[in-house]
Image: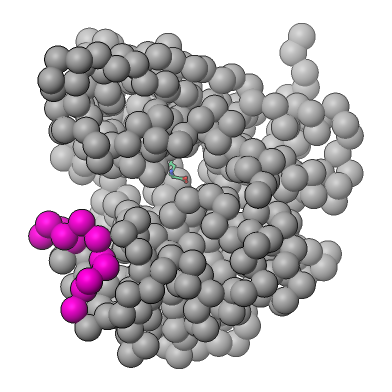
Amino acid sequence: MQSALESALLQLESAVAVLGIDEGLHQLLATPRRSLEVAVPLRRDDGSLEVLQGYRVQHNLSRGPAKGGIRFHPHTDLNEVRALAMWMTWKCALIGIPYGGAKGGVAVDPRALSRNELERVTRRYASEIIPIIGPEKDIPAPDVGTDEQTMAWIMDTYSMHSGYTVTGVVTGKPVSIGGSQGRGGATSRGVMYACFSALREAGVDHREVTIAVQGFGKVGGLAAQYLHDAGCTVVAVSDVGGAIYNGDGLDPAALLKHLRSGADTVVGYPGTDSISNAELLELDVDVLVPAALEGVIHEGNAANVKARFVVEGANGPTTPDGDKVLEDKGVVVVPDILANSGGVAVSYFEWVQDLQAYFWSEDEVNDRLKVLMERAYDDVSALATAKGLSLRTAAQVIGVGRVAEAHRTRGLYP
Ligand code: GLU
């Protein structure tokens, strides 16, 4: 199966071909500007010492400071972080926010650590990447396995080293310390806007669609809830424990409450049938929302996907081989850099609010998010129609094209 990095590089190649970018600039766009690898020693609660591996990759800085999340996951490695950083570059350019792309990660299973251990890992990792982060340099945010508490610890660590409080060094913070209203649900809300744009374009009433959400976590959980609240029927969701199905529809808010009150998986929830994660991806639904990790739709299973729309809440859930199969079947794929861009969009709003020390209402945040995402969708769809491209290639062409343009305009130093 194609790795995240292979996928990202192939997608870049497709955009480069459409744009007619020369080989030198192609190479520049394919290469991360900086890759930092750090050791993260952790004193476990039992007194033993473990050394974890951490990364921060700044893929491109041509349009502004680097921006992107930090992932805590046992399988994270440098190549995955490179791919994720590259996708951040195109995503920020596509939605028109003044950032380059970055990503960070620590190879660790956060669920296997105590809260104190998690705090120590986070603070040590933060102190190791301090030389390259900052509100004007590189602004981390949550990703898989991290949350607003992680951001609070990073903000505090950075601020303690600076000697004063620097709110703008991370986004996705708690509202009490400079976070933005609406950031918590922003990626999920954006997934809903992207989904509705695609349905509207196809003339489909969103109140008549059935939806399966793979990954009932930070992004998928709230996306399921928002879609349900807007009138869609969410028939299946999954998490690491497996998947559940109810043809009459699930109640995502009740499921989220069930998880918050201590259940460690959605599996076994009353009134639902257990199915496998693989079965969920192949359900006969209108919309499939992959909202977990990379590479879940690939050459091996894409032919069995029955959904007419795939709205990518995750980064890189479809490999290029999988993409080809979906495209041939006429499935509309709303690509990750468009569909999940609501998170970084509201991160941008948070950073702007921090820099100005002037905060907006939740309605203001949500309204601006909607405008930004609908505009990005319309740009992508117009280009796709005009040039006969898939939405993915059109989104990449816009993102990559803007970054290429920034390089040409700035020129090469020295
Ligand atoms: N981790 C999220 C993403 O992949 C958000 C990044 C950010 O807000 O900087 O888009």
Question: Where 137 sits versus 162, above or below?
Answer: below
Q: Is residue 120 above or below residue 4?
A: above
Q: Left or right of 130: which side holds 10?
A: right
Residue 45: x and y, percent? 13, 22
Q: Quadrant of ligand 1?
A: top left
> Magenta stretch containing residue 263, yes or no?
yes
Residue 324, how many percent across, how many down? Answer: 74, 63
**Which residue corresponds to the image point at 58% horizontal and 46% vertical from the top-left?**
91
Residue occupying image coordinates x 82% and y 68%:
388
Q: How many marks?
A: 0
Q: Residue at x 24, y 14 (%)?
A: 49
Place residue 129 in its image quadrant.
top left
Q: Is residue 176 left or right of residue 188?
A: left
What are the residue bounds of the magenta stretch? Answer: 259-270
Q: Is residue 226 above or below residue 28?
A: below
Q: How is the image coloured?
A: one colour
Q: Nearer the viewer, residue 292 or 240?
A: 240
Of 378 and 34, nearer the camera is 34
Which quarter shows the C terminus?
top right
Query: Within the magenta stretch, is there residue 315?
Result: no
Residue 10 at what x, y percent from top left?
75, 45
